[in-house]
Image (tube, rainbow, N blue to C red):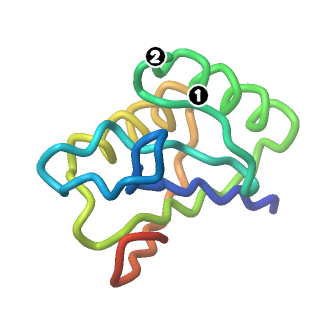
């Protein structure tokens, strides 16, 4: 069984390196296999397409979704929807205290 880790990584600093207060943070980045893949501004279709390819390459694919325990569900839900649209049935969650998974 293949395994794919999806990290939902919050954006903590702006382009100038200044800390962004939690209430003002933009949507997080999503990384597959530790590589930057997509941001919400790009839309979630790219994530769904990538997950479909991973699933076709490995029908028994298992996904581990990692995120900070305080990450908004609004940013976790689209990843779950993308997994469902890619027909991935085995999704596990992993959370971590702090700002980065």
Mark 1 neighbour density, 10 Å: few (under 14) some (14–19) many (20 or more): many
Label 2 neighbourhood size at 10 Å, few (<14), some (14-19), many (20+)?
few
The location of residue 17, given as percent across then percent down, is 46, 52
State yes or no: discs 1 and 2 in contact (Cβ < 8 Å): no
Give the side of residue 99 with respect to residue 84, left or right: left
Judging by the rendered image, the residue that carries numbered circle 2 is: 43
Vertical arrangement, residue 36 with respect to residue 94, above or below: above
Q: Which one is nearer the viewer's eye here, 30 or 92?
A: 30
Residue 22, percent across and down?
Answer: 18, 57
79 over 20 or under it: above or below:
above
For residue 94, the mark is: none
Left or right relative to 85: residue 26: left
Q: Nearer the viewer, mark 1 or mark 2?
A: 2
Q: Is mark 1 on a helix, strand or loop?
A: helix
Nearer to us in this view, 49 or 23: 23
Pick out the residue farthest to the bottom: 97
User: Residue 70's image quarter?
Assistant: bottom left
Number of numbered callouts drawn: 2
Kindly identify the residue that appears in the image at 66 percent across and 33 percent down. 51
**Residue shown at the point (78%, 42%) measured from the top left:** 59
Q: What residue occupies the far right of the structure in this picture?
A: 57
Q: Residue at x 68, y 42 (%)?
A: 36
* The N terminus, quarter of image: bottom right
In the depicted structure, whether residue 22 falls above or below residue 38? below
Q: Position of residue 25 (x, y in %)?
A: 26, 45
63 and 30: which is toward the camera: 30
Inter-mark Cα distance, 1 to 2: 8 Å
Q: Where is residue 48 in the image (x, y as percent from the top left)?
A: 57, 24
* Secondary structure of the residue carrying numbered label 2: loop
- Quickly name the residue at label 1: 47
């Amino acid at each position: 069984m293949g395994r794919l880790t999806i990290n939902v990584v919050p954006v903590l600093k702006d382009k100038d390196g200044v800390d962004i207060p939690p209430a003002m943070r933009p949507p997080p980045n999503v990384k597959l296999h530790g590589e930057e893949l997509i941001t919400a501004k790009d839309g979630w279709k790219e994530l769904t397409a990538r997950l479909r390819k991973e699933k076709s390459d490995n029908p028994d694919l298992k996904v581990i979704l990692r995120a900070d325990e305080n990450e908004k569900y609004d940013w976790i839900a689209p990843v779950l929807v993308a997994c469902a649209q890619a027909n991935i049935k085995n999704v596990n969650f992993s959370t971590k205290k702090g700002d980065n998974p």
